């Protein structure tokens, strides 16, 4: 994910001359949030391999963090797609 974020920044800089646009303004903070959740989940799972065996207390946060990533990535992908394939307004 950090490599994809770096290439995204480079592409934005190269293709759009780092001009702030609505999709970029939405994608940057959501990407940072998704990265933090993913890194936290990775480290948590690495340290506690059976975190999903018992979903009580703090383990429920792991599960919710995993679920939250789905809409985050969907929104990030949607706005990325609108930069590649702009939606024409009539």
Image (tube, rainbow, N blue to C red):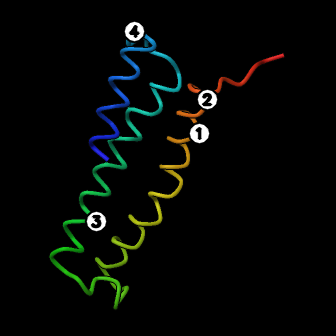
User: Which quadrant, please, contains the C terminus?
Assistant: top right
**Image height of 6 relative to 37, above or below:** above
Q: Nearer the viewer, mark 3 or mark 4?
A: 4
Task: Provide the secondary structure element on which disc 3 rests.
Answer: helix
Q: Earlier in the sequence, mark 4 or mark 1?
A: 4
The residue at the point 56 percent across, 25 percent down is: 83
Q: Earlier in the sequence, mark 3 or mark 1?
A: 3
Q: Earlier in the sequence, mark 3 or mark 2?
A: 3
- Proximity of marks 2 and 1: CB atoms separated by less than 8 Å: yes
- Proximity of marks 3 and 2: CB atoms separated by less than 8 Å: no
Label 2 – label 4 distance at C-alpha: 17 Å
The residue at the point 53 percent across, 42 percent down is: 77
Q: Nearer the viewer, mark 3 or mark 1?
A: 1
Residue on which the image places disc 1: 78
- Toward the viewer: 68 or 39? 39
Residue 87 at x, y percent in the picture: 71, 25
Residue on which the image places disc 3: 41
Label 3 – label 1 distance at C-alpha: 24 Å
Label 3 – label 4 distance at C-alpha: 34 Å
**10 Å crowding of disc 4: few (<14), some (14-19), many (20+):** few
**10 Å crowding of disc 1: few (<14), some (14-19), many (20+):** some
Residue on which the image places disc 2: 82
Q: Which of the labelled discs sits on residue 17, or is there none?
A: 4
- Residue 66, quarter of the rendered image: bottom left
Q: Earlier in the sequence, mark 2 or mark 4?
A: 4
Task: Provide the secondary structure element on which disc 2 rests.
Answer: helix
Task: Provide the secondary structure element on which disc 4 rests.
Answer: loop
- Residue 13, quarter of the rendered image: top left
């Amino acid at each position: 994910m950090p490599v994809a974020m770096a290439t995204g920044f480079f592409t934005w800089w190269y293709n759009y001359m780092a001009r702030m646009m609505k999709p970029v303004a939405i994608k940057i903070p959501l990407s940072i949030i998704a990265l933090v959740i993913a890194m936290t989940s990775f480290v948590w799972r690495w340290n506690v391999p059976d975190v999903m065996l018992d979903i009580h207390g703090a383990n429920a946060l792991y599960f919710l963090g995993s679920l939250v990533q789905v809409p985050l990535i969907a929104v990030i992908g949607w706005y990325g797609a609108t930069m590649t394939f702009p939606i024409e307004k009539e």
